[in-house]
Protein backbone atom coordinates (compact mmCIF):
# COMPACT_ATOMS: atom_id res chain seq x y z
CA UNK A 1 0.00 0.00 0.00
CA UNK A 2 1.81 3.09 -1.26
CA UNK A 3 1.73 6.34 0.67
CA UNK A 4 1.45 9.69 -1.07
CA UNK A 5 4.77 11.55 -0.89
CA UNK A 6 5.56 14.27 -3.43
CA UNK A 7 1.92 14.39 -4.58
CA UNK A 8 0.80 15.33 -1.07
CA UNK A 9 2.04 18.92 -1.46
CA UNK A 10 -0.21 19.56 -4.46
CA UNK A 11 -3.02 17.10 -3.72
CA UNK A 12 -5.49 19.77 -2.61
CA UNK A 13 -4.66 21.91 -5.64
CA UNK A 14 -5.71 19.19 -8.05
CA UNK A 15 -8.70 18.18 -5.93
CA UNK A 16 -10.18 21.68 -5.85
CA UNK A 17 -12.84 20.63 -8.36
CA UNK A 18 -14.20 17.94 -6.01
CA UNK A 19 -17.50 19.11 -4.46
CA UNK A 20 -16.50 18.30 -0.90
CA UNK A 21 -19.48 20.20 0.52
CA UNK A 22 -21.89 18.02 -1.46
CA UNK A 23 -19.97 14.87 -0.55
CA UNK A 24 -19.93 15.95 3.08
CA UNK A 25 -23.67 16.58 3.18
CA UNK A 26 -24.34 13.22 1.57
CA UNK A 27 -22.12 11.54 4.15
CA UNK A 28 -23.75 13.41 7.01
CA UNK A 29 -27.15 12.30 5.75
CA UNK A 30 -26.04 8.68 5.85
CA UNK A 31 -24.65 9.12 9.36
CA UNK A 32 -27.82 10.76 10.69
CA UNK A 33 -30.09 8.20 9.06
CA UNK A 34 -28.17 5.53 10.93
CA UNK A 35 -28.41 7.29 14.28
CA UNK A 36 -24.99 8.95 14.29
CA UNK A 37 -25.76 12.61 15.02
CA UNK A 38 -22.64 13.27 17.06
CA UNK A 39 -19.88 11.55 18.97
CA UNK A 40 -16.49 10.17 18.00
CA UNK A 41 -15.90 9.37 14.32
CA UNK A 42 -12.82 7.84 12.71
CA UNK A 43 -11.84 8.99 9.22
CA UNK A 44 -9.85 6.04 7.88
CA UNK A 45 -7.53 7.10 5.07
CA UNK A 46 -8.11 10.76 5.87
CA UNK A 47 -5.46 12.18 3.54
CA UNK A 48 -5.04 15.92 3.96
CA UNK A 49 -8.02 16.06 6.32
CA UNK A 50 -10.53 17.92 4.15
CA UNK A 51 -13.48 15.66 5.04
CA UNK A 52 -12.20 15.28 8.60
CA UNK A 53 -12.40 19.05 9.01
CA UNK A 54 -15.82 19.14 7.35
CA UNK A 55 -17.29 16.69 9.83
CA UNK A 56 -15.57 18.48 12.71
CA UNK A 57 -17.36 21.63 11.58
CA UNK A 58 -20.63 19.71 11.91
CA UNK A 59 -19.87 18.91 15.53
CA UNK A 60 -18.40 15.43 15.29
CA UNK A 61 -15.32 14.57 17.37
CA UNK A 62 -12.81 13.39 14.82
CA UNK A 63 -9.86 11.03 14.58
CA UNK A 64 -7.94 10.81 11.31
CA UNK A 65 -5.77 7.87 10.29
CA UNK A 66 -3.50 7.81 7.24
CA UNK A 67 -0.22 6.12 6.34
CA UNK A 68 1.26 9.19 4.60
CA UNK A 69 3.22 11.50 6.86
CA UNK A 70 3.25 14.12 4.10
CA UNK A 71 -0.54 14.13 3.81
CA UNK A 72 -0.91 14.31 7.59
CA UNK A 73 1.47 17.28 7.75
CA UNK A 74 -1.01 19.20 5.59
CA UNK A 75 -3.92 17.94 7.69
CA UNK A 76 -2.15 19.27 10.79
CA UNK A 77 -1.76 22.69 9.15
CA UNK A 78 -5.52 22.76 8.54
CA UNK A 79 -6.11 21.75 12.14
CA UNK A 80 -3.95 24.62 13.39
CA UNK A 81 -5.97 27.09 11.29
CA UNK A 82 -9.38 25.73 12.27
CA UNK A 83 -8.61 25.11 15.94
CA UNK A 84 -10.47 21.79 15.86
CA UNK A 85 -9.39 19.20 18.40
CA UNK A 86 -8.67 16.43 15.88
CA UNK A 87 -6.40 13.50 16.70
CA UNK A 88 -4.30 12.45 13.71
CA UNK A 89 -2.50 9.10 13.70
CA UNK A 90 0.04 7.93 11.12
CA UNK A 91 -0.96 4.31 10.73
CA UNK A 92 -1.54 1.72 8.04
CA UNK A 93 -5.28 1.06 7.81
CA UNK A 94 -4.57 -2.67 7.67
CA UNK A 95 -3.33 -2.58 11.26
CA UNK A 96 -4.68 0.62 12.80
CA UNK A 97 -5.05 0.89 16.58
CA UNK A 98 -7.30 3.17 18.61
CA UNK A 99 -7.51 3.91 22.31
CA UNK A 100 -11.16 2.85 22.46
CA UNK A 101 -14.29 2.44 20.37
CA UNK A 102 -15.95 5.03 18.14
CA UNK A 103 -19.53 5.78 17.10
CA UNK A 104 -18.71 5.50 13.42
CA UNK A 105 -15.90 4.82 10.98
CA UNK A 106 -15.86 6.41 7.54
CA UNK A 107 -13.50 5.74 4.64
CA UNK A 108 -14.12 7.64 1.41
CA UNK A 109 -12.38 8.69 -1.81
CA UNK A 110 -11.74 5.01 -2.67
CA UNK A 111 -9.24 4.53 0.14
CA UNK A 112 -10.16 0.84 0.44
CA UNK A 113 -9.21 0.25 -3.20
CA UNK A 114 -5.59 0.71 -2.15
CA UNK A 115 -5.92 -2.58 -0.27
CA UNK A 116 -5.15 -4.86 -3.20
CA UNK A 117 -5.34 -8.22 -1.39
CA UNK A 118 -8.87 -9.32 -0.37
CA UNK A 119 -7.51 -11.03 2.76
CA UNK A 120 -5.99 -7.75 3.89
CA UNK A 121 -9.20 -5.86 3.19
CA UNK A 122 -11.04 -8.42 5.29
CA UNK A 123 -8.59 -7.61 8.10
CA UNK A 124 -9.46 -3.92 7.76
CA UNK A 125 -13.13 -4.87 8.16
CA UNK A 126 -12.27 -6.98 11.23
CA UNK A 127 -10.54 -4.00 12.81
CA UNK A 128 -13.50 -1.76 11.97
CA UNK A 129 -15.81 -4.23 13.66
CA UNK A 130 -13.52 -4.35 16.69
CA UNK A 131 -13.38 -0.57 17.18
CA UNK A 132 -17.05 0.25 16.59
CA UNK A 133 -19.52 0.89 19.40
CA UNK A 134 -22.20 -1.84 19.59
CA UNK A 135 -24.63 0.33 17.59
CA UNK A 136 -21.96 1.97 15.42
CA UNK A 137 -21.78 2.00 11.64
CA UNK A 138 -18.99 1.75 9.11
CA UNK A 139 -19.55 3.80 5.94
CA UNK A 140 -17.14 3.55 3.04
CA UNK A 141 -17.04 3.97 -0.72
CA UNK A 142 -15.11 2.13 -3.39
CA UNK A 143 -14.38 2.33 -7.09
CA UNK A 144 -15.92 -0.63 -8.86
CA UNK A 145 -14.24 -3.15 -11.10
CA UNK A 146 -16.43 -1.76 -13.89
CA UNK A 147 -14.91 1.71 -13.47
CA UNK A 148 -11.35 0.48 -13.87
CA UNK A 149 -12.22 -1.83 -16.76
CA UNK A 150 -14.46 0.48 -18.77
CA UNK A 151 -13.74 4.06 -17.65
CA UNK A 152 -10.42 4.66 -15.94
CA UNK A 153 -8.12 1.86 -17.01
CA UNK A 154 -5.70 2.32 -19.92
CA UNK A 155 -6.32 6.04 -20.26
CA UNK A 156 -4.26 9.14 -19.53
CA UNK A 157 -5.42 12.11 -17.49
CA UNK A 158 -3.46 15.35 -17.53
CA UNK A 159 -3.90 18.79 -16.06
CA UNK A 160 -1.79 21.91 -16.22
CA UNK A 161 -1.73 24.77 -13.72
CA UNK A 162 0.64 27.71 -13.40
CA UNK A 163 2.27 26.32 -10.26
CA UNK A 164 2.07 22.61 -11.04
CA UNK A 165 0.99 20.04 -13.63
CA UNK A 166 0.47 16.31 -13.69
CA UNK A 167 0.23 13.39 -16.10
CA UNK A 168 -1.62 10.35 -14.78
CA UNK A 169 -1.21 7.17 -16.86
CA UNK A 170 -3.52 4.26 -16.00
CA UNK A 171 -2.90 0.60 -16.82
CA UNK A 172 -5.58 -1.91 -15.91
CA UNK A 173 -4.64 -5.58 -15.60
CA UNK A 174 -8.00 -7.28 -16.00
CA UNK A 175 -6.97 -10.76 -14.88
CA UNK A 176 -5.49 -9.48 -11.61
CA UNK A 177 -8.06 -6.66 -11.44
CA UNK A 178 -5.30 -4.23 -10.51
CA UNK A 179 -5.16 -0.66 -11.78
CA UNK A 180 -1.63 0.73 -11.88
CA UNK A 181 -1.25 4.43 -12.23
CA UNK A 182 1.96 6.25 -12.86
CA UNK A 183 1.87 9.84 -11.73
CA UNK A 184 4.30 12.42 -13.11
CA UNK A 185 4.30 15.76 -11.32
CA UNK A 186 5.86 19.03 -12.41
CA UNK A 187 5.98 21.47 -9.50
CA UNK A 188 7.20 25.04 -9.80
CA UNK A 189 10.31 25.67 -7.68
CA UNK A 190 9.78 29.05 -6.08
CA UNK A 191 13.44 29.48 -5.13
CA UNK A 192 14.84 28.72 -8.58
CA UNK A 193 12.14 30.52 -10.56
CA UNK A 194 13.07 34.16 -11.03
CA UNK A 195 13.29 36.94 -13.61
CA UNK A 196 10.27 35.59 -15.42
CA UNK A 197 11.83 32.15 -15.85
CA UNK A 198 9.80 29.29 -14.34
CA UNK A 199 11.75 26.24 -13.19
CA UNK A 200 9.83 23.04 -12.45
CA UNK A 201 10.90 19.95 -10.55
CA UNK A 202 9.67 16.57 -11.77
CA UNK A 203 8.47 13.88 -9.36
CA UNK A 204 7.16 10.39 -10.10
CA UNK A 205 4.97 8.06 -8.06
CA UNK A 206 3.39 4.70 -8.85
CA UNK A 207 0.25 3.51 -7.09
CA UNK A 208 -1.96 0.44 -7.31
CA UNK A 209 -5.67 -0.02 -6.68
CA UNK A 210 -7.85 -3.11 -6.94
CA UNK A 211 -11.26 -3.24 -8.52
CA UNK A 212 -13.87 -4.90 -6.29
CA UNK A 213 -17.45 -5.94 -6.92
CA UNK A 214 -20.36 -5.34 -4.56
CA UNK A 215 -20.74 -9.10 -4.07
CA UNK A 216 -17.09 -9.36 -2.98
CA UNK A 217 -17.51 -6.50 -0.53
CA UNK A 218 -20.56 -8.14 1.03
CA UNK A 219 -18.74 -11.44 1.41
CA UNK A 220 -15.65 -9.84 2.96
CA UNK A 221 -17.76 -7.85 5.42
CA UNK A 222 -19.77 -10.88 6.50
CA UNK A 223 -16.66 -13.05 6.83
CA UNK A 224 -15.20 -10.32 9.06
CA UNK A 225 -18.27 -10.56 11.29
CA UNK A 226 -19.97 -7.37 10.16
CA UNK A 227 -23.55 -6.91 9.00
CA UNK A 228 -24.16 -5.54 5.53
CA UNK A 229 -26.88 -2.88 5.91
CA UNK A 230 -27.14 -1.02 2.62
CA UNK A 231 -25.41 -0.08 -0.63
CA UNK A 232 -26.03 2.93 -2.85
CA UNK A 233 -24.91 4.19 -6.19
CA UNK A 234 -22.66 7.02 -5.03
CA UNK A 235 -24.35 10.25 -3.90
CA UNK A 236 -27.84 8.82 -4.42
CA UNK A 237 -30.21 6.47 -2.64
CA UNK A 238 -30.47 4.32 -5.74
CA UNK A 239 -29.46 0.68 -5.74
CA UNK A 240 -26.08 0.04 -7.40
CA UNK A 241 -26.18 -0.81 -11.08
CA UNK A 242 -23.89 -2.85 -13.25
CA UNK A 243 -22.50 0.44 -14.58
CA UNK A 244 -22.01 2.04 -11.14
CA UNK A 245 -18.54 3.53 -10.92
CA UNK A 246 -18.51 4.29 -7.19
CA UNK A 247 -20.60 2.59 -4.51
CA UNK A 248 -21.25 3.56 -0.90
CA UNK A 249 -21.69 0.75 1.64
CA UNK A 250 -23.09 0.93 5.16
CA UNK A 251 -22.20 -1.89 7.55
CA UNK A 252 -22.81 -2.51 11.25
CA UNK A 253 -21.53 -4.81 13.97
Image (cartoon, helix red, strand yellow):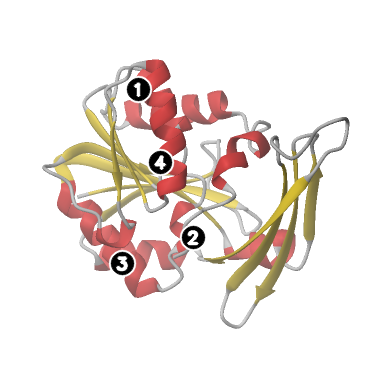
SS for callout 2: helix
* Spatial separation of the CA atoms under disc 1 and disc 3: 28 Å
Picture layout, residue 160 above or below residue 118: above
Name the mark on residue 113: 2
| Residue 151 x %, y % | 73, 59
Give the residue drawn at x 26%, y 68%: 223
User: N-terminal of the two: label 1 or label 4?
Assistant: 1
Does residue 27 show up? no
Determine the residue positioned at 51% across, 65% down.
213
Question: Residue tagged by mark 4?
Answer: 72
Residue at 86% from the left image edge and 30% from the top image edge:
195
Instruction: Say which residue label 3 marks.
Output: 122
Query: Gap between marks 3 and 2, in whole Å?
Result: 12 Å
Mark sitting earlier along the chain (4/2): 4
Q: Nearer the viewer, mark 1 or mark 2?
A: 1
> Which circle's residue, 1 or 3, is located before the other in the chain?
1
**Taking 207 as reference, is 88 left or right?**
left
- Measure the C-alpha gap from mark 1 to mark 4: 16 Å
Asked which secondary structure carries label 1, the reply is helix
Residue 148 in the figure: left or right of residue 208 = right
Mark 1 and mark 2 lie on one chain; the one further toward the N terminus is 1
* Front residue of 195 and 87: 195
Judging depth in this view, the residue of 210 and 227 nearest the camera is 210
According to the image, label 1 marks what residue?
A: 56
Tell me the crowding category of disc 2: few under 14, some 14 to 19, or many 20 or more residues within 10 angstroms, Cα based. Answer: many
Q: CA distance from mark 1 to mark 2?
A: 25 Å
Q: Tell which circle, 3 or 2, labels the residue nearer the N-terminal end.
A: 2
Label 3, residues with CA under 10 Å away: few <14, some 14-19, many ≥20: many
Amino acid sequence: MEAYTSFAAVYDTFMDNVPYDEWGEYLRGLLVENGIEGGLVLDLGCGTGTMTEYLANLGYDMIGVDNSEDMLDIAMEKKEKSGHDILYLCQDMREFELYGTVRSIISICDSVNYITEPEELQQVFCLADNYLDPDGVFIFDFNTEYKYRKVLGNCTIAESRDECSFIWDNYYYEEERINEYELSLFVRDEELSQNGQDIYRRYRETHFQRGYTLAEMKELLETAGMRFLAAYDAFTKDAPKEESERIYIIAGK
